[in-house]
Amino acid sequence: MTVLITNQPVIAKGMCTQAQLRTVHDRLETLLGKEGAYLDAIYFCPHHPEKGFAGERPEYKIPCACRKPSPGMLLQAAEDLHISLQESYMIGDSDRDVQAGRRAGCTPVLLHSSSDLYAFAASLPPV
């Protein structure tokens, strides 16, 4: 199972609407599909606790349990999709991703480039 877990503070900052983000996600899924890949689900956090951005959306300017490094989105995905977090990898490109993975009970993998992703994927046993 492949799930995208992403912080999207651009929504709280007023730089993007949820509809615009859905368009981006739709495009991502189309591009993945052309390569024979797909996502089982996408979870995003629209929150950003810091204030002071022009056009910010006050309803999203809150501390939350879903914004990485909190594990909320991973825990929700595990519940919704019946995923064993102990048998899962949290693959990301930031310390926030690693912390969220650890807090959720996943094996975190920190990548620095797309070639790291290919090397990691090649190291996994076949499914």
Image (cartoon, helix red, strand yellow):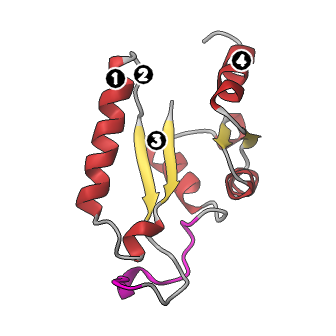
Per the image, is 28 magenta?
A: no
Look at label 1 and name its amino acid: Gly
Q: Secondary structure at mark 1?
A: helix
Residue 117: image location, x then y, percent: 66, 28
Q: Is residue 11 above or below residue 22?
A: below
Query: Which residue appears at 40% of the width and 27% of the height?
Result: 38
Label 1: how many Cα within 10 Å (few below 14, some 14–19, many 20+)? few
Is mark 4 in CB contact (under 8 Å) with mark 2?
A: no
Q: Secondary structure at mark 3?
A: helix
Look at label 4 and name its amino acid: Leu
Label 4 to label 3, Cα distance in Å?
Answer: 22 Å
Q: Of discs 3 and 2, which sits in the foreground? A: 2
Residue linked to disc 4: 124
Is mark 1 in CB contact (under 8 Å) with mark 2?
A: yes
Q: Is residue 51 above or below residue 9?
A: below
Is mark 4 in CB contact (under 8 Å) with mark 3?
A: no
Residue linked to disc 3: 81
In terms of sequence position, does the residue under pointer 4 or pointer 1 come before the other? Answer: 1
* Residue 102 as seen in the image, left or right of residue 9: right
In terms of sequence position, does the residue under pointer 4 or pointer 2 come before the other? Answer: 2
* Residue 84 as seen in the image, left or right of residue 7: right
Label 4: how many Cα within 10 Å (few below 14, some 14–19, many 20+)? few
Label 3 to label 1, Cα distance in Å?
Answer: 20 Å
Q: Quadrant of the C terminus?
A: top right
In terms of sequence position, does the residue under pointer 4 or pointer 3 come before the other? Answer: 3
Q: Of discs 4 and 1, which sits in the foreground? A: 1
Residue 33's mark?
Answer: 1
Residues drawn in magenta: 54-67
Look at label 2 and name its amino acid: Ala
Kindly report the secondary structure that dominates the magenta region of the rendered protein: loop
Residue 18: image location, x then y, percent: 29, 62
Label 3: how many Cα within 10 Å (few below 14, some 14–19, many 20+)? few
